[in-house]
Amino acid sequence: MDSLFPVTLTLNGVIATHEVSQRTTLADFLRQTVGLTATHVGCEHGVCGACTVFVDGRIARACLMFAIQAEGRDIRTLEGFAGDRRMEVLQRHFHERNALQCGFCTSGMLATAHQLLEGSPDPSREEVRESLSGNFCRCTGYHAIVDATLDAAAELNAATVAPEAEPAC
């Protein structure tokens, strides 16, 4: 029987402590121990991107990281983006463009697109394609996903450059 080790981390803004086996991946920890199911386990080799989460503010593959490596780290899953404007806009445009089909890859795609728009608010089509190239989708193809990301960028940019209304007298 594997020994269990305590792990304390910040998960979606809340400090959490759980006991885990040294061989438990972060993806399995999130899904099985904590019950957060937006993080999917696909290839288990870090290739498909379905398990993409944020670790200390940068995307990472949860299937390639052990839960004990998350000790003291800040982990953010798709569930942790409630109320995040950029994520809400991305989700809406993914829905409008039908860029999510079965949904298995969607959380990883959204996390990757979120990070892209955070660092490059007005990306080109090629930049979006390059950024999403580490995430696989077998249902929609990538046109709708790229279009949804570009639509979200355009909306977010329009909101930041829109002139403020003149105050009423």
Image: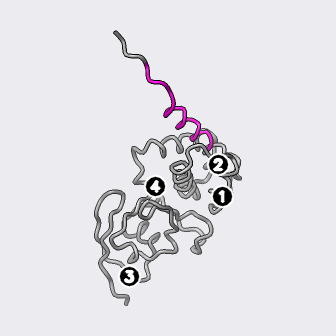
| Residue 50 position (above or below residue 95) | below
Local secondary structure at mark 4: helix
Mark closer to the observer (2, 3): 2
Q: Element type at marker 2? A: helix
Point 54% across, 68% down: residue: 41
Sequence-earlier tag: 1 or 2: 1
Q: Earlier in the sequence, mark 2 or mark 3?
A: 3
Q: Is residue 142 above or below residue 33?
A: above
Name the disc covering residue 78, or none: 4
Location of mark 1 (residue): 137
Task: Specify the segment rendered in magenta.
Answer: 150-165
Q: Is residue 4 left or right of residue 153?
A: left
State how far apart marks 4 and 3 are (Cα).
Answer: 24 Å
Report the quarter where the C terminus lies: top left
Q: CA distance from mark 4 to mark 2?
A: 17 Å
* Residues at discs 1 and 2 in contact (Cβ within 8 Å): yes
Residue 163 colored in magenta in the image: yes
Measure the alpha-carbon separation of dots 4 and 1.
17 Å
Dominant SS type (magenta)? helix
